[in-house]
Image (cartoon, helix red, strand yellow):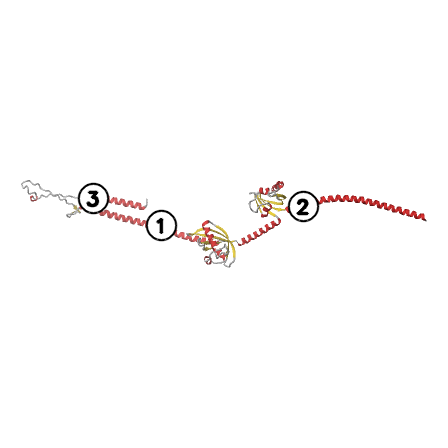
Amino acid sequence: MSVEQRHYCQLLLLAVLLILLFSAGTMFAEVKTPVKTTTMHLPSTLTDQDDSTAVRPSLRLTVVERKWLHQDESPGIDRQKVLHYLFLLVAGSILFAGTLIIWNLLLKRQVKRKTVQLKNQLIEHQKIEKMLKENETYFRAIFNAANDAVFIHDIETGAILDVNYKACEMFGRSWEEMLQTDVGTLSSGVPPYIQEEMVALIQKAANKGPQLFEWQAKDKSGSLFWNEVYMCKAPIGEEDRVIATTRDISERKQTEEKLLLSEQRLREAQSIVHLGSWELDVTNNRIIWSDEAYRIFGFEPQVFDVTYEDFLGRIHPEDREAVDRAYRESLGKRIGYRIEHRLLLPDGTIKYVCERCVTEYDEWGKPRCSIGTVLDITERKMVEIEIQQLNFELEKRVVQRTAELAEKNRELERFNKLMVDRELRMIELKKEIDRLRKEAASLKK
């Protein structure tokens, strides 16, 4: 039971007691009031004159006398009513006085309680103000200590409501100038990097969730640079705002452009020499191929992820087991391998390739990934085959020519032998002729 309820109960009991007291006083007054009776005999003249000789009894008039404060009551005043009104007045006065006292006590208690509440609220309000000031100090310190430029935007208009020191430094403007500048002025102005697109992105971040994108910005001197912007909605004060965190990625963009140019040149070089590269994720059984590797194996570049089974499926059936065995042995011996084999494409085309592969292992010695190259050597192989065929034909022709030459040599030898025999016979004939001449000359003498 509250204090007010207890006071109301006390007031009600007091009123009941006063009513009981009033009732008891009234009854006591009716019992204790002295009564004096006086008998008066009226003269006969006041009686009926019809029967003058009859005996007329005396008339008695009782007069009640009441004393109030030891004085005779004035004629015409009822002391009982006076006493009734007196008690009623006293009871009402006491009731009114008690009510005033209790009401005064209640008011004092309420004033005291309200005073304590207001004092506590004031103390709490002062604590909250102190905390808010400290939080504002902490927020401003963190806000300005951020290494990225931070913007706070109005959702509807995209207006810049606040920025940190890094934003002022990035765009070469003072804090006051930044607040007076719109996002279009801080953009390059080349579509889509314009005011309307940025406001649309701010509203998208507020309605559909955080946004991450790249933006071409412009500083006070007019120099263009690239930013990476992350936007999200956040309650600040009593309203929702959009916070944009901006990071200068100009160096990264230059590196990416150089990397893209390098990759393009690598692709062109691989295309020229028909050399592809690939990387096999052993754990997930997923092969990452270069564009030229896709073309060598007869796939459309980057159409789908290739597995080790897809790779084996394009190898000529007669070479498939040898290639798989070479790879498995390289994993077991933890060495690289080099192998030349054929590919059989879906259209029946046969290609010759030379593959090289090395495998990287984790700290537990398990294969993590295999990195390799595939060189299309079809033209070289076709030349080699053609050379082999030419060599075979040449060797065949050499054999045939050798046999022909041997026969010719034999014939020549026979001819030479005949010629030699002829020459010998001619010599012998010459000698015989000379002898005969000499003999003839001797005979003549």
Residue 89: x, y in percent?
22, 48
| Count of marks, rendered view | 3
State the image coordinates of residue 190 (x, y, percent, origin top left).
Answer: 51, 56
Give amino acid for label 2: Glu
Q: Is residue 174 above or below residue 342?
A: below
Instruction: Identify the image quadrant of residue 57.
Output: top left
Task: Please name whichever residue, 16 or 206, is drawn nearer the observer in this view of the structure.
Answer: 206
Residue farthest toward the bottom in the current orientation of the protein: 221
Comparing labels 1 and 2, the label whose residue is closer to the camera: 2
Q: Earlier in the sequence, mark 1 or mark 3?
A: 3
* Residue that mark 1 sits on: 117
Dot 2 falls on a residue whose secondary structure is: helix
- Mark 3 is surrounded, within 10 Å at the Cα level, by few (under 14), some (14 to 19) or many (20 or more) other residues, namely some
For the residues bearing labels 1 and 2, Cβ distance under 8 angstroms = no
Q: Secondary structure at mark 3?
A: helix
- 349 left or right, relative to 172: right
Left or right of residue 1: residue 353: right
Q: Residue at x 24, y 44 (%)?
A: 19
Q: Earlier in the sequence, mark 1 or mark 2?
A: 1
Question: How far from the left and from the top, in percent, is residue 352?
Answer: 63, 45
Instruction: Determine the residue positioned at 27% across, 48% down.
Output: 99
CA gap, disc 1 to disc 3? 50 Å
Q: Nearer the viewer, residue 255 or 274?
A: 274
Residue type for callout 3: Thr
* Callout 1 touching callout 3 (CB < 8 Å): no
Category of crowding for the residue at label 1, using alpha-carbon neighbours closer than 10 angstroms: few (below 14), some (14–19), many (at least 20): few
Q: Which mark is residue 26?
A: 3
Give the number of the mark in front: 3 or 2. Answer: 2
Q: In the shown orientation, is residue 177 left or right of residue 321?
A: left
Number of other residues with Cα within 10 Å of mark 2, as a class: few under 14, some 14 to 19, many 20 or more: few
Please say whether residue 386 is visible from this viewpoint: yes
